[in-house]
Image (cartoon, rainbow, N blue to C red):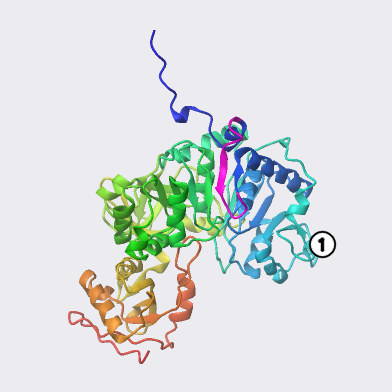
Amino acid sequence: MTEASPSHPWDRRLGFWWIAEDHPEALAIAASPEGVFTYGELAGRSHQLVHLFRSLGAAPGAPVAVMARNGVTLVEASLACHESGLHMIPLNTHLSAHELGLILRHSGTRVLVVDAAFAGVLDGIEFEGGEPGDSNLAVLTVGEVEGRTSLQVARADHPTTLPNGRCQGGLFVYTSGTTGHPKGIRRPLRDGDVGALANEAAVFGRAFDLRPFDGPMLVSTGMFHGGSHAYYMGGLNVGHALVIMERFDAEATLAAIEAHRIRSGYMVPTQFHRLLQLPDDVRSRYDVSSLHSIVHSAAPCPRAVKERMMAWWGPVVWETYGGVEGAATIAKPTAWLEHPGTVGRAVKGVRLAILDDDGAELAPGEVGHIYVDNGVGFTYHDDPEQTDSVFRGSRFSLGDMGYLTEDGYLFIADRAKDMIITGGTNVYPAEIEAVLLDHPDVHDVAVIGVPDPDWGETVSAVVQVAGGRDWSEALEALLVAHCRQRLASYKVPRRWFVADELPRTEAGKLAKRALREQFASPTLVLSRESSGDPEDSRDRTGAGGS
């Protein structure tokens, strides 16, 4: 008689709802600002929100918007929407009243849940009928706000029992921090049992080796961000309890990794840079040996930064490229070490192409516009012109430039809209930023193009100096010399600006538009222009004093 082989962890029932049914006592949230919650407790809280949202008129297909700090609210609201056919809109907590109003009207949001800390933004929104109570929008606050109904009070009268008529819902994601017309992506909803669909979604974790019930997942980025949401929900679907930080702090992150024996997590490159800026004695104080799969995306990660993270944490850092429009690539740690700087190869079912401005496909090694064909596509909500602008046939662009190698590895050059054209030559700011971030006196940096009457644009750097240093001509000379060692002369910044802090989104992306508006005026004189490289024959004039 042959002994039966033990079942593989992936053979068991996974997905949040089946885990909550089979293992209600298992921890779903191991730490958060609100405390700890088991799978059973979190399922009950989510069911309760379904009953509440339905009582407020949110039928399947309706959007529910949530503006909340990191914590249980975003998790349970997402679960509630996913089991009741609703679309959850996770809102950037930095939105202005104008931006929030645009999203609420454009999406047709039926219920808005807003943290008391951000409720003041409601005063600046013009609702149909004047006030929220006179419109089709129901507003609930997380915490007490005078004159408004709190979520805690509103949910108290509703049961935590399994709701009837369960059906699959999903995300309705808007680009964060938009200042123009909002872009929202709402995907068609799938049919089927919500437990079975969540079990299918657990395959997401397999792509990043998130092993079932393997240990807790760290949540240290803004939970409203689409990338962050995908990973913490992915963690729950494979039994990873969430350790939720209200806000990122470099040393507190290391302390959480050690205290909770963190196995998985999602981060952005800016966090890596902040961690590496900690003194050596602080970094060595904490045990990070429990880490197994830390995924990063959202913004380019300088090669030197990732190499240092791998040297410190080991080959546990995974990379993915894509967006809410669709996934594109994955770079396993071993593949990245073999091809440093890559964002990986296409995920299953995706085809990549590099196209020139006219839509012609470019050969391997040639930089052009990155296009993705995932066989599914997407549409921007109620905006066919915007949708058409990013598609060429079945291929769509996320707005990035890059190239493919012969064996299919993708390398990102930069955002197409951030590219600088100086003297007819294309310059990619991300390359220069990566070099400058590798200098110990640079805390953060953004490279932009400043209008120039002769050359079109001048390569310019906006620097946030590392703590304890003041900007000086000597420091500028050091940075110029640092760049000249690694970059062609035409890529070395000619103008230098100093900022106390650089604007970044919660995803870690530099808010280049805001920086260009602040620093790129041709009449603005806030810096001095570096002297030309002896090998560069361009005739340049000084920009004046600092």
Residue 440 colored magenta? no
Give the labeled residue for mark 1. 134
The answer to whether 259 appears left or right of 346 in the picture is: right
Task: Please tell me which residue lies in front, 385 or 118.
Answer: 118
Q: Where is residue 134 drawn, in percent x and y? A: 82, 62
Three-letter residue code for mark 1 = Asp
Q: Where is residue 131 drawn, in percent x and y? A: 79, 66
Q: Is residue 396 visible?
A: no
Q: So how many labels did they put on this image?
A: 1
- Measuring 45% from the left and 30% from the top, which residue is drawn there? 9
- Sort mark 1 into few (<14), some (14-19) or many (20+) by Cα contacts within 10 Å: few
Residue farthest toward the bottom in the current orientation of the protein: 545
- Measuring 30% from the left and 70% from the top, which residue is drawn there? 439
Secondary structure beneath dot 1 equals helix
Specify the quadrant of the image occupied by residue 191: top right
Q: Where is residue 105 drawn, in percent x and y? A: 69, 61
Task: Please tell me which residue lies in front, 166 or 117.
Answer: 117
Q: Is residue 119 visible?
A: yes
Residue farthest toward the top in the current orientation of the protein: 1
Q: Where is residue 501 drawn, in percent x and y? A: 46, 75
Task: Please tell me which residue lies in front, 504 or 495.
Answer: 504
Picture layout, residue 276 above or below residue 310? below
The answer to whether 468 appears left or right of 218 in the picture is: left
Task: Please tell me which residue lies in front, 150 or 64.
Answer: 150
Image quarter hosting the C terminus: bottom left
Image quarter hosting the N terminus: top left
Q: Which residues are magenta?
A: 22-35
Residue 27 colored magenta? yes
Picture layout, residue 80 above or below residue 340? above
